[in-house]
Amino acid sequence: MARTVLSCQTPSTVAQQLSELLQCFPSAAIGGIQWKTLLSKYEERYSTRLDIFGLGHTSPLAATTTLLWDVLRLVDSEDGDNPIVAVEDSVVLVPKPGSAASWPSLYKVLCSVLREHGTVQEEGGQQSILVSQLKPLLQRYWHSTFDEGSLGYLTEEGSAVKMKKMKHLLQALLRWRTQRLDWQSCGGRHSRDMDEALAPELELLPSKRHNDLLLRFAGSVPQEKPWTALGQVLPYQGEEDEAGEALSPEVSTVASTTSSAVQEELAALRAENEKLRHRNSALEKSVRDQDSVPEAQLPENLFDNPYEPPPQVWHGGWSAASSPTASTVAHSTFSGSDGTPLGSGCVTPVQLAPVGQAITLVPMGWFAMGDRGLIPCGLVQQARAVFEQHTAIPNWFMQQ
């Protein structure tokens, strides 16, 4: 008969061993196991008796909450000497080879593998995958050391069960999923991550074309996650806190509050875009109005002759532009001492354009320089005789 001795290990070592042993129970991810069963399997595996009082604990309940604090999910604490303990959902959803309690993570990966790599194996059938194809896929997506032949677990009573084939593992996964859903329907704890992992239902059925089993979804293929348009997960309506109580309305409306803030921001952006749109429309209308103003049309032959002045200057002709009181021009021709003909005369200003735009001819006189700079003799007398004979100044332009 083996001798049982008191455990002399440190509390940290005992806590690690208890945690690893608890995760060998698939029920640790469902409704939990009794403390007495866990303690019995601990003493059987390590061939020693665990003295919780020697470790400084006053009761089994105090020992479990202290030694298993990092993985503990306390299911029932009414019996302080034999509480029901389980593993936290966040722990069992992490792949861990050798831990039967991590079966929810394996189930979740199976659903993802079926979505990504499943094919239609039967005519008119659903998307499915052969069981013989699962091992390399699970080694790739779940854990590189996965081997169904090395897996085993402990029942709620503490009996050891060894798995040999992939179909045995799949059958156990389907059974554990059903047990978890039944436990939740009877008042068990809900959690969003666990419910999303176990939401798809899988089934095993024999293949008609191959000597193998097919794994497929029971019903329509579910979606991976209910993502919103902004990439956020929709709030879970049945979520509860760690004590198993329903969350307060304030906590459950956090996502809706965030969504409302986003909607308000979108409404402000839409209003600003509408304002800019109206402003652009007004600018476009102003540009169109400017383009519609007719341009001044000029005569085609306005600049044909570069020596002609603009038409508005000579409008009305020479006769209309002339002054009614035309000037009288007197001129004479004479010769100088050297016989060179000299022109001498006086021209009064003549208005050749309308008033305001007149071009005045300045009177000019040409006289010889030097000894011929004097006024020719008889010029004044001749001009005087002309003025005395006529009452009005003659118009020399008309005479010519």
Image (spheres, helix red, strand yellow):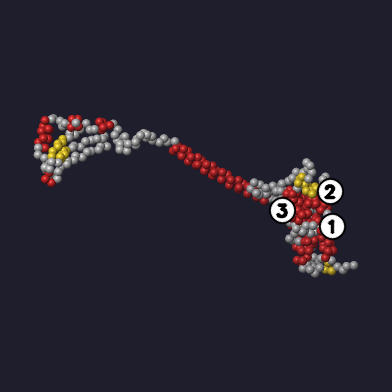
| Location of mark 1 (residue) | 162
Provide the secondary structure element on which disc 3 rests: loop
* Residue type highlighted by circle 2: Asn
Q: Which quadrant of the structure image shows residue 100?
A: bottom right
Q: CA distance from mark 2 to mark 3?
A: 47 Å
User: Does the CB distance between marks 2 and 3 fall below 8 Å?
Assistant: no
Q: Which of pointers 2 and 3 indicates the residue nearer the eye?
A: 2
Residue at screen point 75% across, 59% down: 71
Sequence-wise, the earlier of marks 1 and 3 is 1
Q: Residues within 10 Å of mark 1 (few under 14, many from 20)?
A: some
* Residue type highlighted by circle 1: Lys
Instruction: Please tell me the numbered disc located at residue 211.
Output: 2
User: Where residue 225 sits: x, y (%)?
Assistant: 70, 48
Q: Which of pointers 1 and 2 indicates the residue nearer the eye?
A: 2
Q: Quadrant of the C terminus?
A: top left
Q: Residue 290 versus residue 376: which sits nearer the camera? A: 376
* Residue type highlighted by circle 3: Asp
Residue at screen point 79% across, 59% down: 98
Sequence-wise, the earlier of marks 1 and 2 is 1
Residue 86 visible here? no
Residue 388 visible here? yes
Q: Quadrant of the N terminus?
A: bottom right
Q: CA distance from mark 1 to mark 2?
A: 24 Å
Which residue occupies the extreme front position in the image?
A: 339
| Location of mark 3 (residue) | 241
In this rendering, would 297 be left or right of 42? left
User: Where residue 35 sits: x, y (%)?
Assistant: 81, 59
Q: Residues within 10 Å of mark 3 (few under 14, many from 20)?
A: few
Sequence-wise, the earlier of marks 2 and 3 is 2
